Image (cartoon, rainbow, N blue to C red):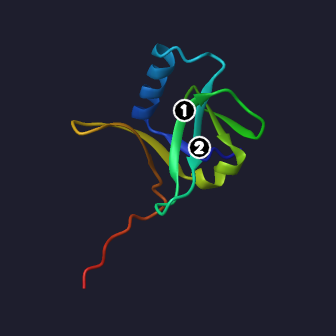
């Protein structure tokens, strides 16, 4: 089965650290999903959860991952990364297959 997402090495380290140090139950997996709506389109979500009916299950670099079947097509090609800088810290979602929009100047 094709795994729709990738997780960067930095994000993998952070996820594994959270799983190890934040008392995440051993039967929980990383859930990757989408939240729809708004004029900005979709936003993406990460969390830890138990498997439910309708989930696709994967393992990426030792990390168990869950994605609802209906979300798979929206996450295809998505890369989960972790950003840590002076201004912010957190997970980011990047789809390298979608070109960035550039404003055209006339």
Q: Residue 102 occupies which quadrant of the picture?
A: bottom left
Residue farthest to the left, as pictured: 86
Label 2 with label 1: CB-CB less than 8 Å: yes
Judge from the rendering whether residue 86 lies leftward or rightward of residue 68; answer left or right.
Answer: left
Vertical order, 57 against 94 (above or below): above
Residue 35: image tag: none
Name the residue rendered at 44%, 20% in the picture: 17
Judge from the rendering whether residue 95 lies leftward or rightward of residue 3; answer left or right.
Answer: left
Q: CA distance from mark 2 to mark 1?
A: 9 Å
Residue 93 % position (x, y): 45, 47
Name the residue rendered at 71%, 44% in the picture: 1
Q: What element does badge 1 sit on?
A: strand
**Nearest the eye: 5 or 36:** 36
Residue 57 % position (x, y): 69, 35
Q: Residues within 10 Å of mark 2 (few under 14, many from 20)?
A: many
Q: Residue 96 occupies which quadrant of the picture?
A: bottom left
Residue 92 % position (x, y): 41, 43
> Which quadrant would the C terminus be assigned to in this image?
bottom left
Vertical order, 97 against 47 (above or below): below
What residue would you read off at disc 1? 47
Residue 18 % position (x, y): 46, 21
Vertical order, 22 against 30 (above or below): above
Residue farthest to the right, as pictured: 53
Q: Residues within 10 Å of mark 1 (few under 14, many from 20)?
A: few
Name the residue rendered at 47%, 16% in the picture: 22
Q: Residue 64 occupies which quadrant of the picture?
A: top right
What residue would you read off at disc 2? 33
**Nearest the eye: 23 or 97:** 23
Q: What element does badge 2 sit on?
A: strand
Residue farthest to the bottom, as pictured: 106
User: How many circles with numbers are drawn on the protein?
Assistant: 2
Q: Earlier in the sequence, mark 2 or mark 1?
A: 2
């Amino acid at each position: 089965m094709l795994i729709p997402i990738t997780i960067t090495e930095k994000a993998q380290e952070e996820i594994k650290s959270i799983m190890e140090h934040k008392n995440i139950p051993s039967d929980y997996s990383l859930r990757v999903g989408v939240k729809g709506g708004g004029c900005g389109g979709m936003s993406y979500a990460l969390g830890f959860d138990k498997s439910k009916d309708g989930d696709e299950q994967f393992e990426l670099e030792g990390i168990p991952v869950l994605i609802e079947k209906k979300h798979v097509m929206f996450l295809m090609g998505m890369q989960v990364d972790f950003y840590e800088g002076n201004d912010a810290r957190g997970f980011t979602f990047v789809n390298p297959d979608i070109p960035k929009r550039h404003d055209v100047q006339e």
